[in-house]
Amino acid sequence: MKIRALLVDDEAPARSELRYVLGSHPEVDVVGEAANAAEALELSRDLEHDVVFLDVEMPGLTGLEAAPLVRERTDPPAVVFVTAHERYAIDAFAVEAFDYLLKPVDPDRLVRVIERLQERSVENVVPVEKVPVVSGGGTELLDYDQVHYVQADGDYSRVHTYDRSYLCTASLGDLEERLPATRFARIHRSYLVNLSKVAGVRRAAPDRFCLQLADAEHTELDVARRQSRQLRERLGL
């Protein structure tokens, strides 16, 4: 299946470079280019397209402001942000970005994005379930299911997986709003836990208990008193 792509970037060399790297993927057909959001919105009304590769920092409307407008149609295209700045990752997924690429575009990351675009169903468009974290000087996207718990770290947070931890530039409160409440619970002012990763419960005092997680370290986290009752109900205790 052909993926019809619209490229939006105020810098012509950046559009040319993206067109070049996409050229090595015969399944992608670049159907149009725009130098700003206004041009992109005009083109999007006239061109059939499946994905918009969208820069963030542009004159006039930014990519973050334009994304919801680009997707205002019965068959909304996927929006893949392509930017030199990783600091926009959290905001990108807040506007239901399909994915997020850093310039210069890594060929392997682009392959994964295109594979996911091919699997994407226009009839069942959902926001990508990813948490952007800092890794090796870049941004890595973790699936929700990889996250065991999140710990407050000043204005930022630290995301813990089975055997690693990552810095996230979003605060714990920001992640609490973005992560699905059906799967995650705030158990303490410093902790947000993926309830599917809870392996056991241990009583720490007559009115206090802690959660034992199924990670490599068998982490135990205290549950705050004011969260205890609600958490017991959710865990069926």
Image (tube, helix red, strand yellow):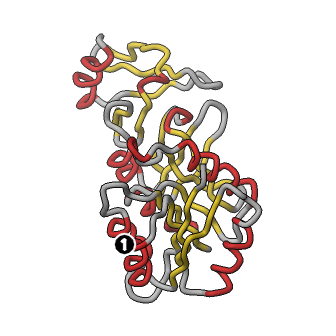
Image quadrant assignment for residue 44: bottom left
Residue 119 x %, y %: 56, 42
Q: Secondary structure at mark 1?
A: helix
Residue at 59 percent of width and 25 percent of height: 215
Q: Residue furthest top?
A: 237
Total residue callouts: 1
Q: Between residues 67 and 52, which one lies in front from this camera angle?
A: 52
Residue 93 x %, y %: 44, 56
Residue at 49 percent of width and 24 percent of height: 197
Q: Locate residue 182 relative to residue 87 in the image: left or right.
A: left
Q: Is residue 217 above or below residue 61?
A: above
Q: Between residues 158 and 43, which one lies in front from this camera angle?
A: 43
Q: Locate residue 31 relative to residue 210 in the image: left or right.
A: right
- Crowdedness near tag 1: few (<14), some (14–19) or many (≥20) residues, C-alpha within 10 Å: few
Residue at 54 percent of width and 75 percent of height: 32
Q: Amino acid at mark 1?
A: Arg
Q: Quadrant of the C terminus?
A: top left
Image quadrant assignment for residue 164: top right
Q: Locate residue 62 relative to residue 142 in the image: left or right.
A: left
Q: Is residue 44 above or below residue 4?
A: below
Q: Is residue 45 above or below residue 163?
A: below
Q: Between residues 78 and 27, which one lies in front from this camera angle?
A: 27
- Residue under label 1, please give it: 45
Residue 185 x %, y %: 35, 33
Q: Is residue 92 above or below residue 54?
A: above
Q: Between residues 142 and 67, which one lies in front from this camera angle?
A: 67
Residue 233 x %, y %: 24, 18
